[in-house]
Image (cartoon, helix red, strand yellow):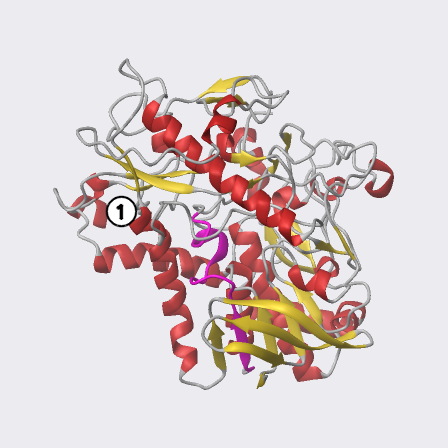
Amino acid sequence: MKDLHADIIIIGGGLGGVAAALAALKMGRSVILTEEYKWLGGQLTTQAVPPDENPWIEKDGSTASYRQLREGIRSYYRRHYPLTETTRGLSLLNPGSGNVSPLTAEPRVGVAVIGEMLAPWFGTGRLTVLLDTRPVAVEQTGDRFDAVEVDSREYGPLVLRGRYVIDATELGDLLEMGAVEHVTGAESQAQTGEPSALPEADPMDQQAVSWCFAMSYHPDEDHTIDRPAEYDKWRSYKLDFWPDRQLSFTGPDPVTLAPDTRPLFAGDSDAEGIEDNWHYRRILRRRNHAEGHFPSDVCLVNWPQIDYCEGPVVGVPPDEARRHLEGARQLSLSMLYWMQTEAPRHDGGTGYRGLRPAGEVMGTLDGLTVAPYIRESRRIKALFTVTEAHVGVEARDGLVGAEVFSDSVGVGSYRIDLHPSTAPRNYVDIANWPFQIPLGALIPERIENLLPACKNIGSTHITNGCYRLHPVEWNIGEAVGALAAYCLDTGETPRGVREAPGHLAAYQQLLRQRFAIPLEWPTHIYRTPRMELFGRAE
């Protein structure tokens, strides 16, 4: 089995893994970065989810390199796409003109821009990227990781050896492989003191997995797919708390839990400002480009109707996890087939047979994303755990602002948005204050040279809901990559950096000055109208 060596081994090429690699490379360190799938970028690319971001993202609340990623996507469209002159001139270009985000775009563009950001480092000899590569085991001595064994589709079995290991996998794979103390699912109120936690802990209560897909629309054509194998099951499926069958345009409102019906189309598919499913997650708008270049818009389906609640994919045997992932695929294909054949049309009749799976956009043949959308991971037992009392508006009991952390390594804000779960249970939706990312939540209780860089940090089932999205994951990864490099430069441990005031101050200065990572929110955000500040009217 061939050995490869680098200063830092990063397992998982999502946004956190990429950001960690860039930070370590900028500090002169060598990096091996692996990714289970064929693309880097995680939830932005293989899962195709447009960035879920804070309301101030264009000016505040992200690192400089995350802004570089965002502006890189806009620049890529300006350089390579036949945009109309009006669209090209928009300083805040939203390529897909989707309502869900100020930057809806095709996943392939995210892949390309990440490639551009990494490109300068390959020629240094300090960056190795292994795609289609998954971890299979770890080697340990005491409280240290010595190596990670991986299986590469191209190179076969490999042993990756480094002085620091970063787990940036979507499910916290190394935590289980290395018997790292961790938590899965929902904690109890007694464990966390959170008012929104369950009366009793349930490790199997995990947010639903969704297998997203993309589709274009050609009203004069028939693109009906083959009837999915599990269509009969999903056609009649109804959760007790769901207001209609799963295959419908009606689901629970995340806040009120009242029935909420959002049709596929509420009028002209090219019009602006329409509140329907087509406009909400549109990732390509043909009218932003030269006439005739694109035959249709492209819409990403990441709706409550494809949230899979039949069972979790963490903490269960591999065969069961695979069965649930295939169930999520079948649910999504069934939703597409239902829309093509049985869905009530906005203009009368049933079925939109012109819906075409947009596989060419997703990098697949069936229109589904390369990878499932994972909302919840194994989470390390950390030196510090962020709870609802640190960030939740009601749980803060009248205090203005989130908890202030002296060991902050970044900031973020996203409403605590827990999707229906595998318990199963309905949405949990909680207003949060814009928050900081504490260094203590990034350091395991025991293992000395393993750091998390995805959804596997020291959060709870509740606070995972606001620490799991794009800019926060990127910030976590960048801080962790810089931390590993700082520790190699100084000989200090991550725990020692946090506990030694001089090291903590030097590390935070590094984050501020070299990486332009904000460690606190500007005070002006608290003058923001409540609807914008909390994501919804409170």
Q: Is residue 222 above or below residue 150?
A: above
Question: In the figure, 107 relative to 394: above or below?
Answer: below
> Residue at the spot x=29%, y=26% of the render?
352
Find the magenta span and give its range. 29-48
Q: Which of the 4 image quadrants contains residue 339?
A: top left
Q: Which residue is mark 1?
A: 90
What number of labels is visible?
1
Q: Can you say which quadrant of the picture contains the N terminus?
A: bottom right
User: Residue 484: where, in percent of width, then height?
Assistant: 65, 74
Q: In the image shown, does 484 or 47 lie closer to the viewer?
A: 47
Judge left or right: residue 22 versus residue 345. right
Q: Position of residue 481 (x, y in %)?
A: 60, 70
The structure residue drawn at horizontal position 65% and vertical position 77%, both measured from the top left corner, is: 486
Which residue sits at x=24%, y=56%?
A: 78
Q: Residue at x 75, y 72 (%)?
A: 497
Check if residue 36 falls in the magenta segment.
Answer: yes
Q: Amino acid at mark 1?
A: Leu
Q: Is residue 62 above or below residue 284?
A: below
Q: Is residue 243 left or right of residue 195?
A: left
Prevalent SS, magenta region: loop
Q: Residue 370, how many percent across, how many down?
A: 43, 53
Of helix, strand and loop, which one carries label 1?
loop
Q: Is residue 78 visible?
A: yes
